[in-house]
Each structure stands twice: as structure tokens, then as C-alpha cells.
Amino acid sequence: MFLSERIKAIKPSPTLAINAKAVSMRQAGVDVISFGVGEPDFDTPRHIRDEAMRAMEDGFTRYTAVGGIPELKDAIIEKFRRDNTLSYERDEVMVSCGGKHVLYNLAHALLNPGDEVIIPAPYWVSYPPIVILAGADPVIVRTGEADDFKLSPESLETAITPRTKLLILNSPSNPTGSVYTESELDALAKVILKYDIGVVSDEIYEKLIFDDRSFCSIAQVSEEVKSKTFVVNGLSKTYAMTGWRIGYVAGAREVIAGMTKIQSQSTSNPNSIAQKAAVAALNGPQGFIQTMVQAFDERRRYLLQRLNAITGVHCNVPGGAFYAFPNFSYYFSAKTEGTTIKGSAGLCEHLLAAARVALVPGIAFGDDSFIRFSYATGLGTIKEGLDRIEDALGKLV
Ligand SMILES: *Cc1c(COP(=O)(O)O)cnc(C)c1O
């Protein structure tokens, strides 16, 4: 059968693929430890599930308004006011089937063939394919450990061309856990205003933040910056609701109208029951988040200390999300039974085979020196996984 050129240009999500591989090994009876998962290992809080059951019982099971029920839009508006001191009206917000779907709709509403989108690397795996599927060109700008994987205003300015349309920012970051400070965002905003480009700010990990760091959205810098920013957020990570598929966006009303048009011709409304549950999540008690963050923080500290104790490995302190992104390049020319390990993908393959540990290679995020560890898994599992990794690395020559 024939396939479109667009589809030939992209690959399936590597993080979902690694997870699927770990699951199938497990089904075959192999005891695999996975650091691959990109979702909280907590159950959706009780009161949110109860609201979904009530919605079903009440017959809230039909099509809804394409861009989300007014009640949910109001809960989102209130969330932005409460948490970010940002004010929006109903026609400036929209609900889609997860944050990923928001990004997909945004790309199609904003981009033309030939447009460039600046994506700092290491990046979330889905940004480049989403841009490519919209016919535009991703422009990857490298960042490194020394600048805590954060884009500097200088490198942003260097990457801008007359074709630049958008910058995608992600703080806290998947995969690095880096969190931009207010003054760093201020400095980036100056460049954005100077060249009049738009910003997509992916804030899905807003609430998963550690130590004394505080979250800041680039939309908070000024009204002018806010008018050029599309704030993307969702319920998946904050409320352990990955399977419910609710994400949302706030930004310029004509773009929201464009995105609603795309959604009306593709998925229609997000799941009606999940929308009711989302209202309960946003308006209800928020104590669950703190409990989850404390558990993540304990694991983060343990994992960080174990990683930095491995010969040749270095890991920056992740300030948010639930990932660590250590540099494993020390092992890249190591030999095992006559073959040489090649890059992050080679090392991950070796660790899956020799240590039965699933990890995502940095190359999937645009930097081959690193490996991503998700610590959305129990402390005991993290300990056992690290023991296995140390053991396997110790046998390399
Ligand atoms: C998980 C994730 C999302 C969105 O997830 P959804 O389940 O589609 O809401 C968006 N951006 C990043 C960086 C993520 O890690």
C-alpha cells in the first residue's frame, strides 16, 4: 500500500515504543525493570473518579461543545487566575484530547510549509514530528549540562531567521527536569518581542517542582508577551490522569477559533465524562498533588545520589517533572563480548538485554550523550534497577 510523504517523514514515539517493549518482555515472563514510563504511578484521586461515575449515571454521555463544556472552560480560567495570575476569557481557552493533541491542533492552526519552529534540545520527543506533520521545519538549538539545559537569549537570537514563526518552551522539562526562572524567561521574552515571534509554553509539569523553586510562565512576563504565548497544560501529570485524555490551551482568540475548527473536523469534543472529571480535578481539593510531589522528591534524591556514584556518570539536579537525564557517554566506546557499544541507543539496548532494565536513549530527545530515567516508579524498583545497571556496567571493558 502507498503512504503519504508526511507519514514517511516521522517515526512512532520512541518512549511509547520502549514502554511497549518492556511490557511485552514482562508478558513473556522476563522480569524487566522499567525507567521508561512517562506517567505518574499513582491512581487518579477518588473524588475525581467519583465525579466521572456520577457523569455516567446522569447520562452525560453525548457530544459536547467541540472546544469543551463551559463549566470546564471556567474551571481552567479560574486555575490560570489562581495559580498563574493570568486572566483569560472563555473564547481564549480550549480543551482537547490531551496536551499532545493541543500541540497538534496548535501546529495546524499556526504553521505553513516553510515556517520554522525553534525547539531547544534536549526536547520532548513529540515536538519535531508534530511540527513536521504540519508541514513546517523544526530548528533544533542545542543546550548543554553547563547551562542546565536551558536556552540562552543569545542562542535563541542566533537561531531566528525571517522564517521563524514559533519557539517551543517546556518548563519543567521532559527529559531534563530543568526549570526556567523568572529572570531567564524575562531575557528570552525580550528576544521574542524584538523579532515578533510566537511562543508555545508547555507547562504540563507545572505542579511537579522541587526544593525552593517556584513555577513561572513566560506569559506572566508582560501583557505583550502573554498576547504572543500559547500556554499548554493538561490533567495527565498533575492529577495522574494520563488515560483520561484532557489537555487545554489558552491564547489568542482567533487561533483558539482556528484550533476549534480543526477539532470540529477531526476528533470533535474531548470525552464528555473525562471533561466532568476534569472540572472536579481543577475545582476540588488539591492536597493529592503535594503527596505525589513528596514521593517523587524522595525518589529523585535517591536516584540522583545513586547515578552520581556510578563511575563516569554525571547527572544535573532536576528541578521538576519526574525524570533524571544523566550523561552516560563515558560508556559509549566500551566493549561487550567483542562488540562495541554505540551511543545512547546501543547502551540502552545492552542494558535491556544484560540487566533487564528499560531506559530511553538520549538520542530520542536530540542529545546522544544522555539517557532518560523516569522515577515514576517505587523506591524499591529504583534501587533494584540501579543495582542491576551498576552490575552490568561493571562488566564492560
Ligand atoms: C506528558 C507530556 C505532555 C502531554 O501529555 P498528554 O497526556 O497528551 O496531556 C505534553 N508535554 C510533555 C513535555 C509531556 O511530557
Image (cartoon, helix red, strand yellow):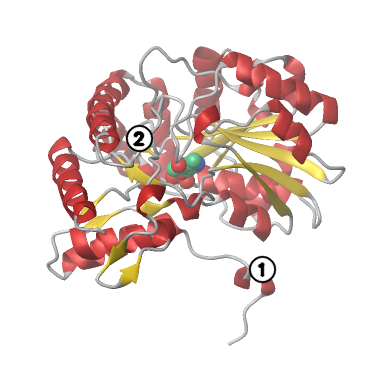
**Circle nearer the N terminus (2, 1):** 1
| Residue 52: image location, x then y, percent | 32, 39
Q: Nearer the viewer, mark 2 or mark 1?
A: 2
Q: Please state which of residues 247 and 334 is positioned toward the viewer in this rendering.
A: 334
Q: Please state which of residues 341 and 388 is positioned toward the viewer in this rendering.
A: 341
Residue 316 vs 182, above or below: the answer is below
Residue farthest to the bottom? 1
Q: Please state which of residues 155 and 232 is positioned toward the viewer in this rendering.
A: 155
For the point 47% across and 29% down, the residue is: 178
Q: Please state which of residues 118 and 369 is positioned toward the viewer in this rendering.
A: 369
Quarter of the image with the N terminus is bottom right
Residue 322: which numbered mark, if any?
2
Classify residue 351 by image quadrant: bottom left
Residue 370 vs 11, above or below: the answer is above
Q: Residues within 10 Å of mark 2 (few under 14, many from 20)?
A: many
For the point 29% across and 31% down, the residue is: 304
